[in-house]
Image (spheres, rainbow, N blue to C red):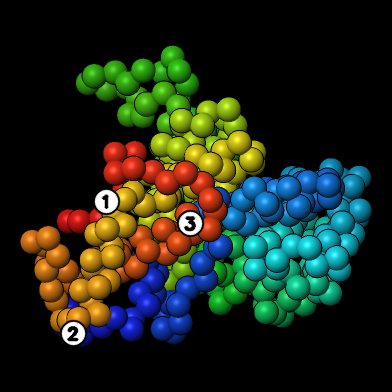
Amino acid sequence: MNNTLNSTQTAPRPGTEAPTGKAPWMPAGPALLFAPADRPERFQKAAERSDMVILDLEDGAREENKAQARENIRAIAREGSLDPERVIVRVNPLDSPHHAEDMRALQGTDFRTIMVPKAEDLSALTGSVLEDARVIALVETPLGVINLPNIANHPLVVALFWGAEDLTAALGGTSSRYGADEIPTPGGGLSGHPGGYREVPRVTRALTLLHAAAAGKVAIDSIHANTSDTDGAHAEATDAAASGFVATAAIHPGLVASIRNAYAPSDEQRTWAAKVIEGAAKNSGAFAVDGHMIDAPLLRQANMIHRRAQAASRSGEPQPTATTNTQTTQQ
């Protein structure tokens, strides 16, 4: 146990301490919502309905609309109606003919959180016109998965994000999830469950989280593609929150409430976290809460629960009860 805890520590999520000792970048909240960059009328609504809006210059802008999409982002930046700290811009991949223009378009704005899709080799980012950018690396190709250690440790990268659909297509697959008729067979056969990810996406999800933590960065979970499946989105986000992801992305505003509710701590968790934080203020070493010894990892969990509770309060979403959220707090 660590005997040097005190209440002035602002402990990041377990495993995400940056190598320099600097606290890792954190999203404004758990629900990130994509908005097509060629549909500027949706920007404000998407920002209002989520914790951070992702203005999408890649898949969210048709080829013939790319130039106008860049101008739309410049225009909303000049207008100043979006908080730059709550905006992520997904640019086109590094090897795309549009990438350089995307980066130049952002140079004259205050938008500095950039999502780079199909991340494989980020060496081209060095010397970029946006040297002060905070990069969210989207890993969604086989080479990207293999290169996760290098991607995670790039100095501009603040977070890892992964994508199941592009990865499955790159593998030559046809579906990232098990179908309703694919029932696990005792003694062999499928290891997954209907609606759940197939094995390679599941491994990629785990590796994304592990490599982010090892590099002192945070991880963002992939979208739930079935936008009408609020129960499935909630279950997946609940697992993401309990596993250590700091946020989940969505492509439809109808899933934002499910994501926020999944990440929001229950009343029981909030009470436990408050007791731990209060105990740390009174004790310089390990101490007990409700008969359980509290050391550094549990204090970090308490701080993360407190941070999520604050984000949930800001969102105004209904808060979960002790029985609707399964995040683990006590061990």
Q: Which mark is residue 68?
A: none
> On the rendered structure, is 312 left or right of 227?
left
Q: Earlier in the sequence, mark 2 or mark 1?
A: 1
In the picture provided, is 26 more to the left or to the right than 169? left
The mark that comes first in sequence, 3 or 1, is 1
Q: Is residue 208 visible?
A: no
Question: Which residue, given by chain and number where applicable, does mark 3 sit on?
Answer: 313
Instruction: Return the x and y of residue 162 as percentages of the image width and height.
Output: 54, 50
Residue at which label 2 appears: 284
> Callout 2, which amino acid?
Ser
Q: Which is closer to the viewer, label 2 or label 3? A: 3
Judging from the image, what secondary structure is the residue with disc 3 in?
helix
Gap in angstroms between the C-alphas marked 2 and 1: 25 Å
Tag 1 residue: 268
In the image, residue 164 sits, relative to residue 298, either above or below, namely above
The numbered mark, 2 or 3, whose residue comes first in the sequence reads 2
- Is 251 left or right of 17, judged from the image as shown? right
* Residue lying furthest left: 291
Up-down relation of residue 68 to residue 198 (above or below): below
Residue 280 in sight: yes
Q: Residues within 10 Å of mark 3 (few under 14, many from 20)?
A: few
Residue at 67% of width from left, 74% of height from top? 133
Q: Position of residue 66 (x, y in %)?
A: 87, 51
Mark 2: which secondary structure? Answer: loop
Give, as a three-letter code, the residue at label 1: Glu
Q: Work out whether residue 31 or residue 195 is closer to the camera in this orientation and state it.
A: 31
Residue 73: x and y, percent?
A: 83, 60
The residues tagged by marks 2 and 3 sit, at their Cα atoms, a distance apart of 30 Å
Residue 126, picture quadrant: bottom right
- In this view, the residue in front, 101 or 325, is 325
